């Protein structure tokens, strides 16, 4: 079995940072999760009672991206280009492993059914049943990155 093992590129990190934004203080997002830094989900074991530094935000992002890469390596058993890898890491980062697996995106990509994968991917824009504009823009950017250079047939 092939085990996928690329690392996210600086362009992939820039995409995530652009859409996540930087918050040096914790806040509650649209889905009710507490967030800090570049989209780091605060867990019960985290303690963020005061502001963090930009360097600490970078460290949290690095840790989160390493976890996403480990997850992607377990999920994907086929070769990806760097752009495909970066787009899937962004999707994993913003939606989580279970959501990525449940949607069927990976299954459709593996089968070479790119149009179906893109359709599913672009519809992953709702939180609690409500479409979120920032997620729509992020999903469009991820799809554009993933499908760069691929011929998509409807």
Image (spheres, rainbow, N blue to C red):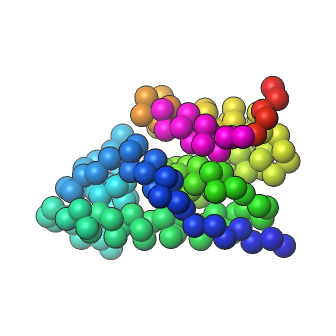
The answer to which image quadrant residue 31 occupies is: top left
Residue 98 visible in rendering: no
Q: Position of residue 143 (x, y in %)?
A: 62, 39
Horizontal side, residue 130 vs residue 42: left or right: right
Q: Is residue 98 depicted above or below 59 in this figure?
A: above
What type of secondary structure mainly makes up the magenta span? Answer: helix
Horizontal side, residue 38 vs residue 95: left or right: left
Q: Residue at x 49, y 38 (%)?
A: 138
Q: Residue most toward the top?
A: 154
The answer to which image quadrant residue 112 occupies is: top right
Q: Residue at x 19, y 64 (%)?
A: 52
- Which residue occupies the foreground of this view, 79 or 50? 79
Q: Position of residue 139 (x, y in %)?
A: 54, 37
- Please give the range of residues in magenta: 137-149
Residue 21 visible in rendering: yes
Q: Position of residue 132 (x, y in %)?
A: 44, 31
- Which residue occupies the foreground of this view, 40 or 33? 40
């Amino acid at each position: 079995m092939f085990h996928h093992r690329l690392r996210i590129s600086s362009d992939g990190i820039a995409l995530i940072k652009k859409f996540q934004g930087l918050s040096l203080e914790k806040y509650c997002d649209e889905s009710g999760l507490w967030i800090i830094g570049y989209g780091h989900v605060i867990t019960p074991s985290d303690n963020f009672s005061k502001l963090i530094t930009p360097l600490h935000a970078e460290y949290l992002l690095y840790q989160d991206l390493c976890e996403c890469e480990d997850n992607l390596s377990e999920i994907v058993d086929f070769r990806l280009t760097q752009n495909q890898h970066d787009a899937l890491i962004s999707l994993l980062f913003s939606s989580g492993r279970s959501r990525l697996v449940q949607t069927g995106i990976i299954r459709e990509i593996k089968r070479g059914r790119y149009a179906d994968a893109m359709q599913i991917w672009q519809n992953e824009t709702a939180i609690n049943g409500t479409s979120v504009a920032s997620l729509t823009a992020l999903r469009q950017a991820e799809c554009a990155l993933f499908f760069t250079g691929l011929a998509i047939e409807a």
